[in-house]
Image (tube, rainbow, N blue to C red):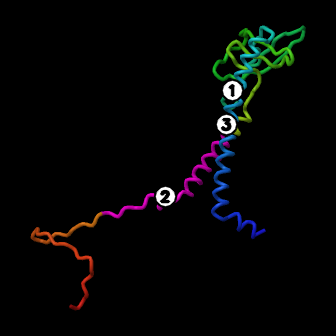
Amino acid sequence: MRAVLTRLNTPPWRTVGCLLLLVVGGLLLWLPIHTQSKLDEWAVELRAGGEPAQAIIYDRTTKRGKTTMYFRYDLGGRTYEQEVPCVEVCRSYGDEVRIWVNRADPSDFVTDFEQLSGHRGRLQGVLGAAGFAILLLGVLLTLSRVPWRRWFPRRRPPRRARTAVGGAFTSRSKHKRRAGR
């Protein structure tokens, strides 16, 4: 086992590991962006082809700084209840809201202010945050592998000339003088 770990600790494998962190972090960061895009498309599709209904906000709660509205609506002789997070719009208790309901799943709807029912995309958001951290770690580790000193060597500061007490210029010798002469 030790031999395997020693082999994986060689410079090429470290570079592969850094690049793997970049790829995994990038994919995890892309996931919430892709999910939000698909949810936006679903909201447009649901609004165009969904069953229109009227919903009443029967409750509104705030927990840990996040507010949620609770909707009640009738569809096909049945009453449904569903929650909607307050993202951009937060309506008051008792307000009526126009919604478009998915015929295949009556608990799935979109509101007139373009908010989908339920709390969607939370897991993808957490994975996106983790992806950002992994991507940042991958970038830092990859940049640490770059031989900056070889490409951009340090420049030595120019040597200063000494001046004598009277203000006359004296130069420095490149060779040390031997003591005792």
Q: Secondary structure at mark 3?
A: helix
Read off the residue under disc 2: 148
Q: Which residues are magenta?
A: 129-157
> Helix or strand or loop: what does disc 1 sit on?
helix
Q: Position of residue 99 (x, y in %)?
A: 75, 12
| Residue drawn at point x = 16 percent, y = 69 percent | 163
Which quadrant holds residue 83?
A: top right
- Measure the alpha-carbon separation of dots 1 and 3: 11 Å
Discs 2, 3 touching: Cβ within 8 Å:
no
- Can you give x and y, in whole percent of width and height, for residue 108 in the image? 81, 19
Q: Quadrant of residue 8?
A: bottom right
Q: Residue at label 1?
A: 37
Residue closest to the eye, 169 or 130:
169
Q: Give amino acid for label 3.
A: Trp
Main SS class of the magenta portion in the image: helix
Q: Sequence order check: which comes first, mark 2 or mark 1?
A: 1
Q: What type is the residue that disc 2 sits on?
A: Trp
The one nearer the camera, 151 or 55, is: 151
> Residue shown at 85%/14% (left/top)?
103
Where 42 sits versus 145, above or below? above
Asked if residue 161 lies left or right of residue 15, the reply is left
As shown in the figure, which amino acid type bears the numbered disc 1? Ser
Is 32 placed left or right of 170 in the picture?
Answer: right
Give neighbour class at mark 1: few <14, some 14-19, many 20+ (Cα, 10 Å).
few
Point out which mark residue 30 bears.
3
Q: Quadrant of the C terminus?
A: bottom left
Q: CA distance from mark 2 to mark 3?
A: 30 Å
